[in-house]
């Protein structure tokens, strides 16, 4: 016995050997003698980034050895390394299961002021200015709303009107009937996926791209079709390549992030949007466009850092293919990740079909959050201006820290969004993410943003924390990397 509580208090589900092998992908990076280390690193990465949540019961060593085509000795060595790291717990006769990542272990990695590890796995800024006054206004509005005897399954009218007006101001004429309030941008994508694609269908996505979109497509038993986003290319997107893929593969749905793409930070220009819109219309491809970061242009040409307002952005992609485009958005990055609400902008016909699909899942979004967001959008710039200035300062601090402490890393300074996408000089992304917690930092490796496990030379660093904490994080990452490459 090892002093652990009964197994039932730890396990939250079981993953089969076949599913785990699929989740691990191309985990073996080195020679024949590094197999146990490589497997442990791959499992550690997936435990830390949430793909194997704490309490997930693992397959037996024999089952996993068969699924991976390796020896039980290698499986045992990998699990022993994970037990030593506190990421796996085992009990004789009951098997093994994942554990919550433990705290800092490296003797030189103590964090200041007793704080926990610096978490760079979530690209979510803290609360923006103006949240509390809008909250208090929503409380007052709620008293009036309580007199109503029903609710609007599309969302409250004032909120839909304000969202519609913002699209119209950006060059996409929109009526409130073309807006549906959702429980976040990702919820909007999930509804579109449920309506427009089914098991066995193909869904086009960007690579690198948004991992939770990949997860949603896979959970719907659809097939991912990746098209590249090149962070160093002049335009980022190969429109001709996307067009060829659409014509050859005929996906039922596409998912794109053309405004401060996650993780590269690229923004598609107006000319490419016009070309892509024509391709979407010609191929009759429904496309979900995620605009979660559209208002986070960091205004490098503006000394006040306010050049990211609606007037500075190219027209929405939907302006060039209105019939085939479903636009989703949320205030998670502009205002606060804890405000779990968002919207869909689509044709009235598509909104009606999405509403019919949604009725089998839920009957609308919480009223109070809608009132709260409506107040924030009544005059958004007083919140968005300080948010952009804050993110710009944090981005610049992160860029300077990486250049100072990791001078052989390469990157393109993003014009907006919340992420710095870094190319490493060697393919160690997963190993670095696995080692970093011992130095007080939590990371998501580049391969998490890929479909075909080709991004081991990449790492995403969100600049959503204060400058001093970002500088400290980079120092720790550099130490972790030195530990990996030390003789």
Image (cartoon, helix red, strand yellow):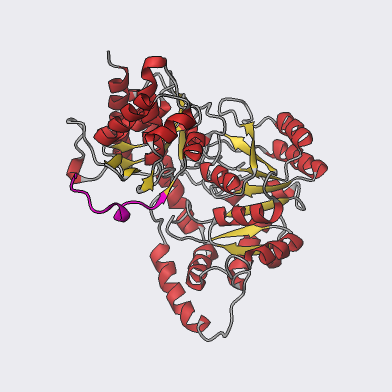
From what the image shows, is residue 469 above or below residue 485? Answer: below
| Place of residue 274 in the rendered image (x, y in percent of width and height, measured from the top left) | 74, 40
Q: Which residues are magenta?
A: 1-13
**Foreground residue, 205 or 52?**
52
Residue at the spot 73% in from the left edge and 45% down from the top edge: 252
Residue at the spot 80% in from the left edge and 41% down from the top edge: 283
| Place of residue 442 in the rendered image (x, y in percent of width and height, measured from the top left) | 34, 38
Relative placement, left or right, of 300 versus 101 is right
Q: Residue furthest top?
A: 487
**Residue 204's quadrant in the figure?**
top right
Relative placement, left or right, of 282 versus 286 is right
Magenta-highlighted stretch: main secondary structure?
A: loop
From what the image shows, is residue 287 above or below residue 77? Answer: below
| Place of residue 56 in the rendered image (x, y in percent of width and height, measured from the top left) | 38, 47
**Foreground residue, 461 or 385?**
461
Q: In which quadrant will I find the N terminus?
A: top left
Residue 403 visible in the picture: no
**Residue 194's quadrant in the figure?**
bottom right
Verify whether residue 234 appears in magenta. no
Verify whether residue 5 appears in magenta. yes
**Foreground residue, 431 or 336?**
431
């Amino acid at each position: 016995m090892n002093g652990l509580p009964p197994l039932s208090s730890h396990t939250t589900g079981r993953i089969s050997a076949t599913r785990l092998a699929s989740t691990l992908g191309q985990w073996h990076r080195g020679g024949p003698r590094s197999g146990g280390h490589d497997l442990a690193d791959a499992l550690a990465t997936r435990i830390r980034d949430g793909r194997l949540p704490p309490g997930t019961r693992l397959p037996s060593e024999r089952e996993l050895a068969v699924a991976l085509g390796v020896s039980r000795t290698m499986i045992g060595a990998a699990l022993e390394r994970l037990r030593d790291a506190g990421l796996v717990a085992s009990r004789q006769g009951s098997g093994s299961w994942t554990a919550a990542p433990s705290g800092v272990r490296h003797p030189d990695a103590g964090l200041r002021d007793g704080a926990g590890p610096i978490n760079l796995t979530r690209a979510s800024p803290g609360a923006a200015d103006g949240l509390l006054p809008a909250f208090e206004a929503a409380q007052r509005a709620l008293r009036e709303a309580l007199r109503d005897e029903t609710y609007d399954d599309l969302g409250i009218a004032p909120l839909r009107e304000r969202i519609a007006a913002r699209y119209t101001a950006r060059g996409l004429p929109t009526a409130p009937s073309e807006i549906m309030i959702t429980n976040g941008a990702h919820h909007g994508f999930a509804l579109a996926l449920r309506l427009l694609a089914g098991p066995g269908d193909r869904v086009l996505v960007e690579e690198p791209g948004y991992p939770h979109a990949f997860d949603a497509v896979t959970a719907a038993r659809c097939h991912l079709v990746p098209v590249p986003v090149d962070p160093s290319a002049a335009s980022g997107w190969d429109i001709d390549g996307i067009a060829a893929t659409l014509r050859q593969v005929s996906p039922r749905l596409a998912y794109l992030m053309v405004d401060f793409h996650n993780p590269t930070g690229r923004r598609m220009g107006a000319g490419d949007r016009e070309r892509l819109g024509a391709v979407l219309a010609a191929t009759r491809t429904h496309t979900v466009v995620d605009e979660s970061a559209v208002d986070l242009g960091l205004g490098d040409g503006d000394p006040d850092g306010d050049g990211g307002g609606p007037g500075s952005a190219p027209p929405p992609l939907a302006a060039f293919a209105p019939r085939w485009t479903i636009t989703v958005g949320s205030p998670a990055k502009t205002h606060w990740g804890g405000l779990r609400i968002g919207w869909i902008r689509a044709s009235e016909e598509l909104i009606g079909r999405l509403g019919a699909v949604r009725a089998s899942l839920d009957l609308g979004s919480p009223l109070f959050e809608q009132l709260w967001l409506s107040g924030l959008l009544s005059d958004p710039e007083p919140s968005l201006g300080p948010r952009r200035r804050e993110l710009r300062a944090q981005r610049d601090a992160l860029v300077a820290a990486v250049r100072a402490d990791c001078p052989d890393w390469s990157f393109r300074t993003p014009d907006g969004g919340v992420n710095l996408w870094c190319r490493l000089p060697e393919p160690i992304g997963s190993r670095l993410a696995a080692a970093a917690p011992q130095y007080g930092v939590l990371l998501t490796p580049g391969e998490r943003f890929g479909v075909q496990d080709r991004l081991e030379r990449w790492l995403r660093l969100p600049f959503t924390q204060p400058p001093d904490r970002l500088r400290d994080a980079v120092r720790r990452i550099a130490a972790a990397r030195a530990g990996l490459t030390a003789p």
